């Protein structure tokens, strides 16, 4: 998952990556594009649909399905649970979001996903509930290797990313 992207940046195999977190060390530069929150996705008749918003404590009371530990989503969720003094122990893991959603659809558990994914999901049998009282967000941005020049084609693509996000109103407030 995300570790490979940073390795490719470090070796110069790629000029930049769009990642959902600032890199952990100074060999990379991070330009935030936008910040997004997470929603809890549940079956249509799940008890959490009766709430205007769910807390991490509410969510922890149900079996959780998520992506594996090497995913950026796992890390974000683990930190949010730890801030609330709760252990992050998903009942189910899958390598892709479609499998996680299939588990939720089957009633095996619930999941937390970034808001940007919602338009891509068939929500006919599911519901998305906002999460409250938690700093459950991810910072999505362009990551480059510190001090390394970006090739012209990569710089052009980076400009397109910024421009398109600005048009859609998702650009980070600077």
Image (spheres, grey):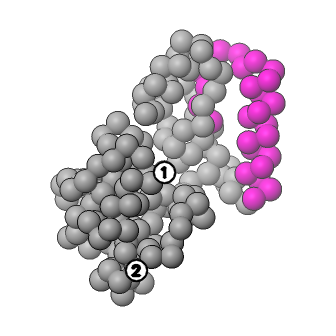
What residue is at 28 percent from the left and 66 percent from the top? 109
Query: Label 1 neighbourhood size at 10 Å, few (<14), some (14-19), many (20+)?
Result: many
Q: What is the magenta range? A: 142-168
Assign the N terminus to one quadrant of the image.
Answer: top left
**Image quadrant assignment for residue 15:** top right
Query: Label 2 neighbourhood size at 10 Å, few (<14), some (14-19), many (20+)?
Result: some
Which of the labelled discs sits on residue 41, or is there none? Answer: none
**Image quadrant assignment for residue 91:** bottom left
- Where's residue 82, x and y in %? 24, 53
Report helix, strand or loop for mark 2: loop
- Where's residue 104, x and y in %? 35, 65
In-image side of 168 versus 59 (left or right): right
87 falls in the magenta region: no
What residue is at 78 percent from the left and 49 percent from the top? 164
What residue is at 56 percent from the left and 20 percent from the top? 9
The residue closer to the viewer here, 146 or 66, is: 66
In-image side of 117 versus 164 (left or right): left
What residue is at 35 percent from the left and 36 percent from the top? 70
Q: Residue furthest bottom?
A: 50
Q: Is residue 68 positioned above or below 2 on the image?
A: below
- Where's residue 23, x and y in %? 47, 32
Report helix, strand or loop for mark 1: strand
How much space separates mark 1 and mark 2, taking CA atoms?
26 Å
In-image side of 169 versus 1 (left or right): right
153 falls in the magenta region: yes
User: CB of mark 1 within 8 Å of CB of mark 2?
Assistant: no
Which residue is labeled 1 in the image?
Answer: 138
Which residue is labeled 2 in the image?
Answer: 44
The tag earlier along the polypeptide, 1 or 2, is: 2
Residue 139 seen in the figure = yes
Residue 133 seen in the figure = no
């Amino acid at each position: 998952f995300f570790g490979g992207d940073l390795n490719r940046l470090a070796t110069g195999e790629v000029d930049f990556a769009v990642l959902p977190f600032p890199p952990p060390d100074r060999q990379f530069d991070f330009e935030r594009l936008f910040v997004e929150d997470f929603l809890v996705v549940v079956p249509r008749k799940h008890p959490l649909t009766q709430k205007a918003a769910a807390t991490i404590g509410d969510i922890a009371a149900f079996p959780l399905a998520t992506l594996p530990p090497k995913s950026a989503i796992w890390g974000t969720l683990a930190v949010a649970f730890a801030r609330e003094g709760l252990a992050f122990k998903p009942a189910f893991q899958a390598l892709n979001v479609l499998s996680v959603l299939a588990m939720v659809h089957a009633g095996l558990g619930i999941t937390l996903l970034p808001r940007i994914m919602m338009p891509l999901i068939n929500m006919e049998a599911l519901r998305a509930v906002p999460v409250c009282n938690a700093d459950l967000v991810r910072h999505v941005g362009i990551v480059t290797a510190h001090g390394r020049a970006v090739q012209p084609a990569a710089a052009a693509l980076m400009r397109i990313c910024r421009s398109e996000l600005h048009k859609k109103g998702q650009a980070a407030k600077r």
